[in-house]
Image (cartoon, rainbow, N blue to C red):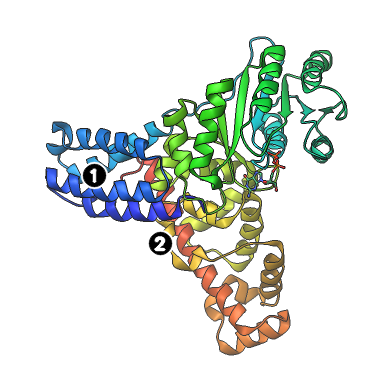
Amino acid sequence: MAFEGLAERLQGTMKKIKGKGKVSEQDVKEMMREVRLALLEADVNFKVVKQFIKDVKERAVGQEVMESLTPGQQVVKVVNEELTQLMGGEQSKIAVAQKAPTVVMMVGLQGAGKTTTTGKLALHLRKKHNRKPLMAAADVYRPAAVQQLETLGKQLDMPVFSMGDQVSPVEIAEKAVERAKEEHNDYVLIDTAGRLHVDENLMDELENIKSAVKPDEVLLVVDAMTGQDAVNVAESFHERLGITGVVMTKLDGDTRGGAAISVKSVTGQPIKFAGTGEKTDALEPFHPERMASRILGMGDVLSLIEKAQTNVDEDKAKELERKMRSNDLTFDDFLDQLSQVKNMGPIDELLQMMPGANKMKGLKNMQVDDKQIAHIEAIVRSMTKAERDDPSLLNASRKRRIAKGSGRNIQEVNRLIKQFDEMKKMMKQMAGMQKGKKKGGFKM
Ligand code: GDP
């Protein structure tokens, strides 16, 4: 998962200072040395690091912090706020044209995830904003790019405008906008061609498309895994073409995250979306504040709740909440939960959003895929109703019987029981968090 190393290091540093009743300039200096190294190691642009350290230092040794009752916590707050600022402060939303259709040009190098993101964005606009997008296939160079978009369109049941690969991209883009007007599509997403490197021909072509269709939004798709290269690419595209926002893809991989932190500072253009997987629903609006909180281990409960809201059956959720509070979760609920959690995305990603959850080692390695769910199901179904309701009944001979009945081995049965216990703990923690929230928000 992205940011893992950075998060670990920063959280360690913050922990040291957070509990201090008194903070000296020397303490701040030492802390900032560690923060600086952590950021550099995460591949954050060195100029960005320098400015960030300067800004935080200035504020952290200021009167407001030093003379407060909880200077340690105030310093952490300053780091959080500055990190949020660094990534753009407020969330930057996708443009909406005064007069439909809103024209969005998707640009980027080959392999960054442009075509995939075009499909993801179309789905996002339909699902979350009730829009009717038209996708346009203007990448006439990469073999089968047009076909890839058409296939995606079929898969998503989304209209695709294409004219094959023998027509100029400018003409395709213009005709696509005309078509959108005729068909009352309120967004046109133009998938343009990429190259392996930034080159003049490419930029010329993109410029021509841009001046022909005057897009409301030029979204640059960059691959977070390429680190500082992604930032350099963004800089070149912005200088030459003028972009209005960035989509940072592959943030689900184990990128160090530096690109995501630097790109706004370097180009002045915000990250608008983050790609978090290969599936078509793995696109999230980028919230700088939530991302900063996630990195600093304060959790991102808002995103978690939003995810839950779109994926979880409401009645079941209510029932589950009751059970979480009273702590009488059964194995049947566990099964239910697993399949719902599966719909929400990779579990390690969800865990990152939970304050303190990264400390639960048992959960960290828990992978949920279809095959494993089938195994877990087999194990749970081999339990009697009494055992499912009360796992404390599960002694050695019962476990053996269950292993045999489900065709799994005893270690797997034990592991599942352990995971179930961890999940119960986690749910209890979440229930506690929700209660805390009602009382007036989180304390750091
Ligand atoms: P294009 O050349 O820029 O149009 O790139 P594609 O859309 O064909 O994507 C290149 C590869 O990156 C494909 O295998 C995609 O599945 C993959 N990809 C795109 N976005 C993401 C993402 O957010 N996470 C992961 N893990 N893979 C992605």
- Picture quadrant where residue 143 is located: top right
In this figure, which residue is indicated by the disc labeled 1? 73
Residue to which mark 2 is pinned: 359
Left or right of 408 on screen, residue 421:
left
Q: Give the image location of residue 150, x and y in percent.
A: 83, 36
Q: Amino acid at mark 1?
A: Gln
Q: State the SS at label 1.
A: helix
- Residue 115 drawn above or below residue 339: above
- Of callouts 1 and 2, which one flags the residue occurring earlier in the amino acid sequence? 1
Q: Tell me what residue is drawn at x 58 percent, y 52 percent.
A: 319
Residue 3 lies, in percent from the top left, at: 45, 50
Q: Residues within 10 Å of mark 1 (few under 14, many from 20)?
A: many
Using residue 408 as the reference point, say whether residue 307 is left or right of it.
left
The residue under the point 65% across, 83% down is 409
**Ligand number 1: quarter of image:** top right
Residue 281, placed above or below residue 264: below
> Visible in this render: residue 271?
no
Which amino acid lies under the numbered mark 2 shown in the image of this protein? Lys
Figure quadrant of residue 175: top right
Foreground residue among 108 and 94: 108
Distance from Cα at disc 1 to Cα at disc 2: 20 Å
Image location of residue 31, percent across then percent down = 23, 49
Circle 2 packing at 10 Å, graded few (<14), some (14-19), many (20+), is few
Q: Percent position (x, y) of residue 441?
A: 36, 40
Task: Confirm or reject: label 1 Cβ below 8 Å from ligand 1.
Answer: no
Front residue of this view, candidates 359 and 331: 359
Q: Tell me the quarter of the picture where residue 171 sits.
A: top right
Task: Please tell me whether residue 374 is drawn above or below residue 95 in the rendered image.
Answer: below
